[in-house]
Image (cartoon, rainbow, N blue to C red):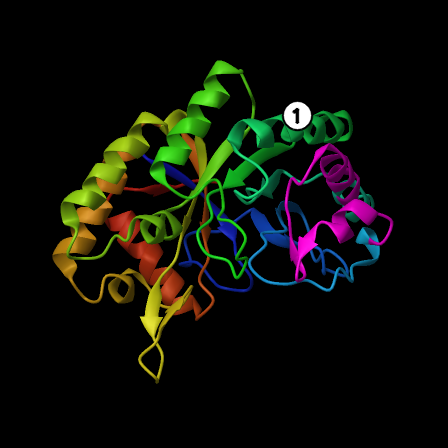
Amino acid sequence: MPYLIPVQYHRMEYPAQIIPTISEVAGHFDIKSLRCHGNYSLHTEYSYGSRRFSSPAVQPYDRIKSANSHGIPKLWYDREWSMEFAEFILDCTSFRKPPEILEIHPPFSDYADLPTFLTYFRVFQKRISERYPETKIFIENRSGSVYREGKFILSTMEQLLELSDLIDKNHLTLRITLDIPQLFTAHGISPSRLKEMQNLFDEIKRIRHNIEGIHLWGKKENQNGRRIAHHGDLNNYFKGRNHFKEAFLQSMHQSFDDDLHRYFVPEVNSNSKDLQSIVGDLVESGFIFVH
């Protein structure tokens, strides 16, 4: 069976019978303090747009502050950056319980590739594990940034396959949290490309042993007809084409039907009704939410 561990996202409410016991907490470079109670997943800097680098915790770290392009952070820029990033996270969390999960994000292609990233990641992981040996570290696939000098090195299915292979060959504890809409964006998946969508899930099944988190959200039009990410439900995302939504849910179920418990983050910024609609679709298709 496919099992999902619900993660609280902002103040959105799950259906009444589903009670999250872990929350996602923002931990980017401009965050002033962590807002968390109980168990939490720390969502670290994701480099979509520019930062002021205004967080008190980031002030001691010159390499983090200097490694940017027009204010957009260059994640995993070098060994020094990686060491400072670990200390930044330890500073941010020093007066709280250790995070259950650290969610990190990939660097850009103009200065790093996956093997290079993993070299720097090991430096980071060593320091984090010294203080927080039980904390899990997940990396999220990314697609889309105002950064113009390169692209994220973990966006496409091919890159996810390469990373999974490197994880296996090097016996790494790093795991993947799969943002499905971002993967679809990277591959241009739309309701007219049903077979391509199903092929992606066939590939996902090959690496599911390294996937321990799932992100899902909607996309709907605003008053000007522009499609807005992280708003709406799956009906909006698939433009009301129920046959495609049903095929999506069936393919997703088949890919994750392995009894592994995965963290589920519903990145919905619109309202609780949309989140509940997405969760309802998952439950109806056979996903089981657990604590």
Image position, residue 14 (x, y; %)? 44, 58
Amino acid under disc 1: Arg
Query: Magenta span has 101?
Result: no
**Horizontal arrangement in the rendering, residue 130 relative to residue 185 (left or right):** right
Image position, residue 45 (x, y; %)? 63, 51
Residue under the point 34% across and 84% down? 224
The quarter of the picture where the N terminus appears is top left
**Horizontal arrangement in the rendering, residue 203 relative to residue 245 (left or right):** right
Query: Magenta span has 87?
Result: yes
Q: Residue furthest right?
A: 60
**Horizontal arrangement in the rendering, residue 232 relative to residue 115 (left or right):** left
Asked whether residue 100 appears in the rendered view, the answer is yes
What residue would you read off at disc 1? 122
Asked whether residue 257 appears in the rendered view, the answer is no
Question: For the residue labelled by badge 1, is the local secondary structure a helix, a strand or a loop?
Answer: helix
Q: Is residue 221 above or below residue 18?
A: below
Q: Is residue 98 above or below residue 54?
A: above
Image position, residue 275 (x, y; %)? 39, 61
Residue 231 figure quarter: bottom left
Residue 286 figure quarter: top left
**Horizontal arrangement in the rendering, residue 39 relative to residue 21 (left or right):** right
Residue under the point 18% across and 57% down? 191
Query: Dot 1, crowdedness within 10 Å: few (<14), some or many (≥20)?
Result: some
The front one of 63 and 180 is 63
Range covered by the magenta-colored residues:
59-88
Image position, residue 279 (x, y; %)? 35, 54
Q: Is residue 274 above or below residue 136?
A: below
